[in-house]
Amino acid sequence: MKVIPGSLAHRIYGTSEATEVFACNYGLNEAFTDQVGSRDLRISGYDEDGTVRMVELPNHPFFIATLFVPQIISKPGKPHPLIRAFVESSFAQQQDRASGIY
């Protein structure tokens, strides 16, 4: 999968390419790709044939939607990068709320 530079997903993966397991028959209707990418949602990942596989909301603390299942390749002690980033973001949000920052 191609990960778009400058996206949250790119910061999480630390690379412009990632290998993911796609076991989904659903996806973004290609007729709406330009509209989705020009609005609040940002397209942040494509597969090798250009099909959108990941989107995010840049103005949200952590919103990434995928058409793959990150937990499939997670292992105890070695979580998928998106899962690790989600947990870290959730913990930071909780800490900010506890300290009155949020």
Image (spheres, grey):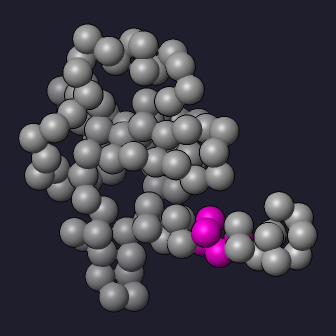
6 on left or right of 80: right
In the rendered image, residue 29, in percent from the top left (x then y), is placed at 23, 21
Left or right of residue 21: residue 52: right
Residue drawn at x 29%, y 38% as measured from the top left: 53
Residue placed most toward the observer, 5 or 91: 91
Does the stretch in magenta take in 90?
yes
> Residue 76 appears at what percent x and percent y?
33, 88
From the viewer's side, name the closer residue of 11 and 28: 28
Residue shown at 63% from the left, 45% from the top: 60
- Furthest residue in direction bottom, as rendered: 76
Percent across and percent down for residue 4 are: 46, 34
Q: Please determine whether, in this image, residue 1 is positioned above or below residue 86.
A: above
What kind of secondary structure does the magenta stretch mostly adopt?
A: helix
Examine the rendered structure and indicate whether residue 39 appears above or below residue 43: above
Q: Is residue 83 above or below residue 41?
A: below
Residue positioned 39% across, 88% down in the render: 77
Task: Look at the image and tell me whether residue 82 can be seen.
Answer: yes
- The part of the image, by quadrant, that contains residue 40 is top right
Q: Give percent across and percent down for residue 49.
A: 18, 27
Report the quarter where the N terminus lies.
top left
Residue 14 appearing in the image: no
Which of the two residues, 18 or 62, is positioned nearer the viewer here? 62
Magenta extent = 88-92
Q: Residue at x 13, y 47 (%)?
A: 24
